[in-house]
Image (cartoon, rainbow, N blue to C red):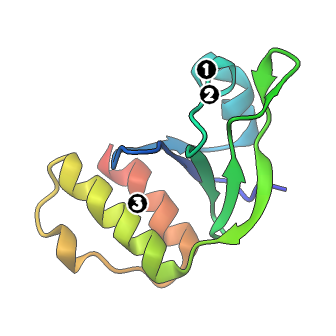
Amino acid sequence: MITWPAVIKYEGDDELSFMHSQAEWDQDADSHLLSFAEGDVLIDSEGCLFNLNNAYDNGNTPLQSQETLSLSALTEVVRKHASVVGQCCSSKIAFITYRDAIQSIKDVE
């Protein structure tokens, strides 16, 4: 089960896409009707990874993998995103919780 909010991490791209809720996922056709690459993942507010390349009934259903990101690994992903979107001092970014890290993506959009 996904703990919202979450972000989509596209394979080979440091920019992240913020997803506030299941309702937003369901309403955003780009989120569930696109063909995702094998390495595209959804990262939830607990650091759990969900595979996105699983077509199901003309859409994509995130399937939980057995992997989770450490908070330090998620922080590095967020730092790279911040750098791509032009936020200065991205190396100083730090978080206490996964939720704070995920929420920060919305804050810099």
* Disc 3 to disc 1: CB gap under 8 Å: no
Q: Is residue 104 left or right of residue 85?
A: right
Residue 74, percent across and down? 47, 70
Residue drawn at x 69%, y 35% is: 53
Mark 2 or 3, nearer chain start: 2
Quadrant of the image containing the N terminus = bottom right
**Which is more toward the observer, 42 or 3?**
42
Which residue corresponds to the image point at 66% horizontal and 32% vertical from the top-left?
Answer: 24
C-alpha distance separating marks 2 and 3: 20 Å
Q: Which mark is residue 76?
A: none
Q: Is residue 10 left or right of residue 99?
A: left
Residue at the left extreme, as displayed? 88
Q: Quadrant of residue 43?
A: bottom right
Residue kind at label 1, given as amino acid type: Leu
Q: Are circles 2 and 1 on residues that touch, CB within 8 Å?
A: yes
Q: Amino acid at mark 2?
A: Ser
Callout 1: 10 Å neighbours few (<14), some, many (20+)? some
Residue type of the residue flagged with mark 3: Ser
- Could you say where residue 45 lies in the image, as x and y percent from the top left? 63, 64
**Mark 2 nearby-residue class (10 Å; few <14, some 14–19, many ≥20):** some
Q: Nearer the viewer, mark 3 or mark 1?
A: 1
The residue carrying mark 3 is 104
| Residue at point 47%, 42% (across, down) | 10
- Residue for point 60% across, 44% down: 20
- Among the 4 quarters of the image, the one containing residue 26: top right
Position in image of residue 72 (x %, y %):
44, 82
Q: Which residue is mark 2?
A: 31
Compared to 64, does 62 lie above or below? above
The residue to which callout 1 is attached is 34
